[in-house]
Image (tube, coloured by chain):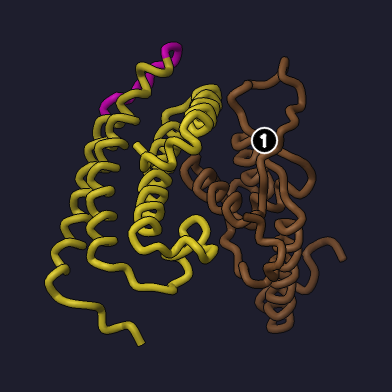
Amino acid sequence: MMPRARDAEDLLPLTAPVFHILVALSDGERHGYALMRQVAADTDGVLQLGPGTLYGCIQRMLANGLVEESDQRPDPQLDDERRRYYRITDFGSRVVRAEAKRLALAVTAARARRLLPRSSGGA
Amino acid sequence: MYPAAFRRAFGQELATTFRNRVEDVLDDGGIVGWLTFSGHITVDWIRTCSSLLMESGAHRSESLGLSLGNLASGSSRPTRWDIGVCGWMGIVGGWFALVAVLAYPALSKYQPPKPTWLVAVFGWYAMFSAIGVAHRITANWGQGPSRASG
């Protein structure tokens, strides 16, 4: 059951683990442990996913059509066969974009009220 | 130790991921890292189990209350049953933490921790904290719902 007709906004707001998992998957497929490490790296170690939280999220994301299991494996010689790889779906991409946009608006509002510095190095 | 359906879906992967994480923590060395990891895993297990049990009990999973979603979103107040589950998981989690920290010397064969008493004290502390929290929660069961519902 792929929820293709659903609006991405229906699923917002996402929780932090789900958002970061989708962000980590947006540049390629990954297995569970790689996701865990990527999320920790992306958040400077602030968000450390435990195995239960990670697979709990993946279970719900699979059920909601945000991610899917990949049948391709990078190189069976280099990898544990028991690992499963996950990739983001088109719907998942739309959802994570919508969430990123929502968060960006929140940051803009916070910045306008001087709760955050005007610019953080970039822009 | 996770609910059966969850184990069937992800058991082997969970075990592999957990093993990888343990290897990393042991490679990094240090009792502090190991204790932090043990605490993190315990909290993760309690959260996951309570979240899965609440969902299966209340059929709330059709919304994307992801991860700790239903607790985090404030969409529903926890029921007595939910609180009871959390309390009991706290107790079991304390024991789990105790076993986890005491397993450290066996797992890190090459670097046995010097302050072993610290490991034991932490384990007992975790267990009694869990029991204390569970006791406080269950002590309020008979007093009806909170007045802060707005």
Quadrant assignment, res B128: top left
Q: Colour of chain B?
A: yellow
From this viewpoint, is residue B89 visible? yes
| Residue numbers of the magenta segment | B109-117
Q: Position of residue B145 (x, y in %)?
A: 23, 78
Please, which chain is the residue tagged with disc 1 on? A
Q: Position of residue B98 (x, y in %)?
A: 27, 34
The chain assigned the colour brown in the figure is A
From this viewpoint, is residue A8 visible? no
Residue in front for this viewpoint, A88 or B105: A88
Name the main secondary structure of what is drawn in magenta: loop
Residue in front for this viewpoint, A106 or A12: A12
Q: Residue at x 69, y 48 (%)?
A: A42
Is residue B131 left or right of A3 when viewed as pictured?
Answer: left
Residue at numbered disc 1: A85
Element carrying mark 1: strand
Q: In this rendering, is residue A91 above or below B13?
A: below
Q: Residue at x 71, y 44 (%)?
A: A87
Q: Of the residues shown, which amino acid type is indicated by label 1?
A: Tyr
Quadrant assignment, res A118: bottom right
For disc 1, the neighbor class at 10 Å (few under 14, some 14 to 19, many from 20) is many
Residue in front for this viewpoint, B99 or B88: B88
Number of numbered discs: 1
